Amino acid sequence: MTSPSPLMPTYVRQPVAFTRGEGAFLFDTTGRRYLDCLSGIAVNTLGHAHPDLVPALQDQVAQMIHCANLFEIPLQDQVAELLLAHSGMTNAFFCNSGLEANEAMLKLARLHGHAQGIDVPQIVVFERAFHGRSLATLSATGNARVQKGFEPLVEGFIRLPFNDLAALQALAARDAVAPRISAVLLEPVQGEGGITAATPEFLQGVRSLCTQHGWLMMLDEIQCGIGRTGRWFAHQWAGIRPDVMSLAKGLASGVPVGAVLADGPAAGLFTPGSHGTTFGGNPLAMRAALTTLEVMARDGLVAHAGALGEKLKASLTAALAGTPGFVEVRGRGLMLGIVLDRPAGALVKQALDAGLVINVTADAVVRLLPALIFTEAEADELVQRLVPLIRAFLQAPAS
Ligand SMILES: *Cc1c(COP(=O)(O)O)cnc(C)c1O
């Protein structure tokens, strides 16, 4: 380090700058090639420089980048119609990021509570959840490190242990006396929390409690949605449908976007003037989302993610089985976590040195989020390069 950085130090950055990508590969300033197993944290659904996305965006930039939401934006209707067809939901709102989508959901939960005559509506959230870094979404997040220093937190959240249906049932019974709860918010697969899936029984149990008590079931599918787990949306594995769902990361393959889909009572809560955004759903983002969704459907990428993920999970599990310090490979589709018994942050740099881009979350979980265009050969390369690194890491004496 010579001169101080002109950037606020919100990230500890790896000492590499990528200048170009192609499919599942990234190239740094020296021209060195890396296998991208992170996709910008589940963002680059179609990988880098996809041959359908590049010309679509070039065409869109030449036509129009931005148009205010004071006018009709037909691309928004097109993207909404595809998302509704895949989800069975009723209508959509577009914004620019994950936390914005979650903010909109939290506002819907408050509107819903007030509509039911609850003066101070409460939203049930869960331990180890991650919902973003605005004041409301960090308050909903179940991670003290995300909240520290930003008190006073936004009120109106009740936190329970994840996957503990009995705890939610007990809360529901207490709440029935003088109802305060208006919604339950959870990730079908906790991403930042360590690739921890809600069990199907938990999702089904939350669904029936929400229906029974008139609460909105709100799912944060920002990381696990858009085909990543092998279904269009991760909750579909449990055979249920939420009342509201937030999307972002993978929806537009890298152009910033967020979306909220609503169903049933939640679909009619926002009215003109009650919510809005300047950039949200602009033509550039919508063209990127439309192209992403069209290519995913045309090329069968959702089923591909599911099948390739099963193979990848099986190969990683087989290759690491019996290694002291290896716990399990968990997750589904192309959202996998290799759980180790110790903090593993140092692996990120070691993997980079070996030409692999990975991530470690929740201290001890190696997180793999490759693009949905990942091939079998690329999955093999990932296993062949990553497994020896993890073995060596686990054998090295603790430093
Ligand atoms: C990334 C993420 C968010 C926040 O999205 P931003 O675009 O960074 O605001 C919220 N929830 C989940 C589950 C996420 O993975």
Image (cartoon, grey):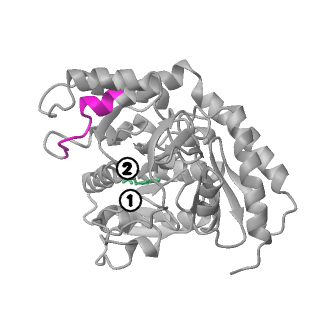
Is 279 a magenta residue?
yes
Q: Is mark 1 within 8 Å of ligand 1?
A: yes
Is 395 a magenta residue?
no
User: The residue under label 2 is which amino acid type?
Assistant: Gly
Badge 1 vs badge 2, beta-carbon distance below 8 Å: yes
Tell me where residue 47 appears, x and y as whole percent. 51, 35
Against 170, residue 337 (above or below) is: above
Q: Looking at this view, is 117 or 330 the one in front?
A: 330
Quarter of image, res 89: top left
In the picture, which quadrant includes the C terminus? bottom right
Q: Is residue 45 left or right of residue 290?
A: right
Kindly state the secondary structure of the residue where label 2 is placed.
helix
Tell me where residue 49 appears, x and y as whole percent. 45, 31
Could you tell me if residue 165 is visible in this image?
Answer: no
Tell me where residue 159 appears, x and y as whole percent. 46, 69
Q: Is residue 88 left or right of residue 315?
A: left
Q: Residue at x 79, y 62 (%)?
A: 391
Q: Which residue is mark 2?
A: 98
